[in-house]
Amino acid sequence: MSPDPDSVRRWIRPEIQALKAYHVLDAGKLIKLDAMENPYRWPDELVDQWLETLRDVELNRYPDPGAQQLTGQLKQAMQVPAGMQLVLGNGSDELIQMLALSVARPERVVLAPDPTFVMYRMIAEVAGMRYQGVPLADDFGLDVDAMRAAIGQHQPAIVFLAYPNNPTGTLFDAGAVEEVIRCAPGLVVVDEAYAPFTDASFMPRLGEFPNLLVLRTVSKMGLAGLRLGLLAGSPDWLGEVDKTRLPYNINILTQVSALFALQHKAVLDEQAARIRADRAGMLDALSAMQGVQAFPSDANFVLFKVPDGSADRVFDSLRRQGVLIKNLNPAGGRLTDCLRVTVGKPEENQVFLAALQTALTE
């Protein structure tokens, strides 16, 4: 028996009814270059070693609620400064949600540049907060004057800065980020999801700014299936945020697998270096195509713009040719006519570039 639609509308918050669920296309047998994943698997011998470590896992027992051994390994691997604390989440999305829940009150504001990671807005609205986007500059850099004005007007509880930014790939000027941190009345969360693909980081500077937190994930470094994120910062802040964490949120398979992977981090680092090198080739190839504007990237993807009005057609053509990328054109605004491609294996990149050339000339 289905529920009465009127009852659903009565009890579900209007803000939730107004939202659209986060939708991920099924790649099927397509070459998957839409989700900023590391395209490389582990070597077979490493897979065998990993599977061996899972033999002793007691699935009948709850995991370590604080994931203490994994937390210690993450502090070392991510070079978290001494005196700083970590809170772990089921991906960085859960940590964004925990942050929002920690500060949420009616009329409080979450602020971020626009365009940026869509979950900042979605989670803010789910938590009952207002979201304020601030347009990026023409080069997709931070517009410091606009950010300063918006912060002064809205007094945000949290400012999120993706560093590098998604979906643009932009690495914001460090001085501009500092200016935002200094003028923000509440928390500033620097989201370093793409840290493996850039040399820039605010992690070493955590103790320098009392309102700074740094968000990381292991997803982009090749462990997307584990769903593990980490938030680093002062124990004063994180001790409060941790109160919103549900018990046993990091399952035992994730804890054991992530610990094993971090003990072999050199393999993941080598893969990231390969992706960075291939990113340069992707940028060169896209920039050489007639009618294509490729934007500089410090992430593992490239944002590019195609001729006016052709993005949807190009996207559909690529799918027909067996390649799935991300169509950002429906977002409108600055992303009109824009597509985003993840840097894949060299052979995948070549198939994509050939298919794009075909799509542009159809």
Image (cartoon, grey):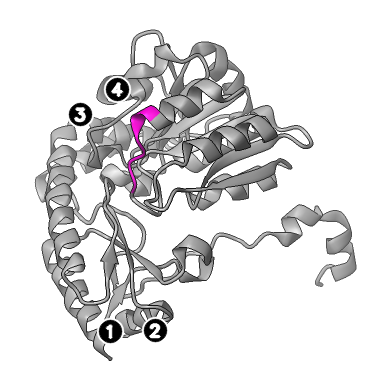
Residue 207, quarter of picture: top left
Amino acid of disc 1: Ala
Which quadrant is the C terminus positioned in? bottom left
Q: Position of residue 351 (x, y in %)?
A: 17, 74
Residue 196 drawn in magenta? no
Q: Which mark is residue 359?
A: 1
List x then y, in percent, for residue 193: 37, 40
Q: Please give the label number shown on residue 263.
A: 3
Of the two numbered discs 3 and 4 on the same chain, state the one appearing first in sequence: 4
Which residue appears at 76% of the width and 32% of the height? 105
The mark that comes first in sequence, 2 or 3, is 3
The local secondary structure at tag 4 comes to helix
Answer with mark 1 or mark 2, whichever residue precedes in sequence.
Answer: 2
| Circle 3: element type | helix
Tell me: 352 left or right of 207.
left
Which is in the foreground here, disc 3 or disc 1?
1
Q: Residues within 10 Å of mark 1 (few under 14, many from 20)?
A: some
- How far apart are labels 1 and 2 at the CA level? 8 Å
